[in-house]
Amino acid sequence: MEMLRKTRAEINLDCIEHNLSAFRGTLAKEVKVAGVVKANAYGHDIVTVTGLLLEEEADYIAVATVQEAALLRRNFPHAPLLVMGYTPDDQLPFTVDQGITQTVFSLKQCQLLSQRALATKKKAKVHIKVDTGLSRLGYRDHALALEEIIATASLKGVEIEGIFSHLALYNPESDQRQYLQFLALIEKLEARGVFIPIKHICDSIGAVAYPQYHMDMVRLGALLYGYCSRKTSFDLKPAMALRTEIAMVKAIAAGEGVSYDYYYKAAGPAKIATLPVGYADGLPRNIWQQGHVLINGQAAKFTGMLCMDQCMVDVTGLDVAVGDEVILFGRRGDQELPLDDLAKWCGTNKNELLSRVSPRVPRVFCQRGVQKKIVSYLM
């Protein structure tokens, strides 16, 4: 018996395929693509999206944590996986054992990887992370980086396959300074005889904004799912739509309050619809202050504080009934509520909203115009 929630995320895999293909059309043939699937592929289901990217011959599948890589290794034994984030020392042996490429930014970790590689007669592939101004992960001291990378290059069992940094995307001048810092370190390494095959600095925004910085590989995340804050030369197609249906419709009198603390009180007689979706499903709690949903093509404003599992909207004057479909964001037929609008209402960005869509929301996938499969994490 199918017991899927009516609150669900519909994901069109054709859109992801289109976004990847369209951007590839702007790349030089030699530039590799790393498909970024961290945070459950920005909410789109990490296993499904990885399968699609491998079919589309992505050069790398990039994640943030070794746990994400472990899940993918179970499903894709031979996929090229790159962990871009920090991995604790005690988890490094697993990356060697499973053939997972690890990001490093200390000689100590490289030595630990070398020890495991020699003990298991395997190769430890690494990408070196360099901080050029984002002040997040990576070598901050480039003089130290130079010496430690040279030392790493001499370690047995360790292959330095890549070196990368991340732009802060503050402004073009700042980004250029970061890029030039990165180039300067690479030039010093090469002068000392260390040549690293894959050099990369661009995420989706950087890759669109700065074609001259593409180097050997670009890391595509949000762009794959249909979003980029820079204008692209092609149309991006958002892949996900979040929808639900009306659970109850009730009439309230003037002065009656709705939800906790009665932040909303009806100015006059009103009709309120309750929706079976709340902040535990990924909707930001503060969206009620200025956001709305679409019901039968009409806007219905949130009324009162969102609850964990439910929320209420004002449907006064609208012809609605229990079971009517509600669009929370995305496109459904000729109706669309852009995710950009939700991001503005909530004072956040689109990536956060996508990645917040929780595991209790089933993902319904379509491809080539037909439903392909359903992923329900709770069933």
Image (cartoon, rainbow, N blue to C red):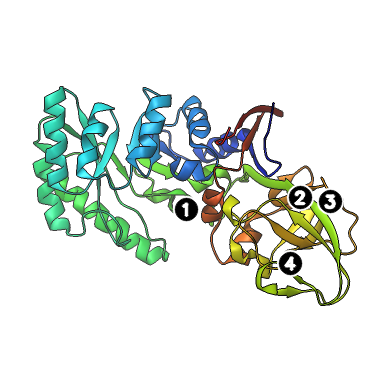
Inspect the image, locate mark 3, and give the three-letter code of the amino acid beneath it.
Asn
The Cα–Cα distance between marks 1 and 3, rounded to whole angstroms, is 35 Å
Residues at circles 1 and 2 in contact by the CB criterion of under 8 Å: no
Q: Earlier in the sequence, mark 4 or mark 1?
A: 1
**In this picture, residue 55 sits left or right of residue 288:** left
The Cα–Cα distance between marks 2 and 4, rounded to whole angstroms, is 15 Å
Which residue was labeled with disc 1?
205
Q: Earlier in the sequence, mark 4 or mark 3?
A: 3
Q: Earlier in the sequence, mark 1 or mark 3?
A: 1
Which residue was labeled with disc 4?
303
- Which circle, 2 or 4, is nearer the viewer? 4
Is residue 367 positioned above or below 349 on the image?
above
Inspect the image, locate mark 2, and give the three-letter code of the amino acid beneath it.
Val
Mark 4: few/some/many CA within 10 Å (<14, 14-19, 20+): many
Mark 1: few/some/many CA within 10 Å (<14, 14-19, 20+): many
- Which circle, 4 or 3, is nearer the viewer? 4
- Which circle, 1 or 3, is nearer the viewer? 3
Which residue was labeled with disc 3?
296
Which secondary structure, mark 3? loop
The image quadrant where one finds the C terminus is top right
Where residue 207 sits in the image (x, y, percent)? 44, 49
Residues at circles 1 and 3 in contact by the CB criterion of under 8 Å: no
- The answer to whether any part of residue 300 appears in the image is yes
Disc ID at residue 326: 2
The image quadrant where one finds the N terminus is top right
Which secondary structure, mark 4? loop
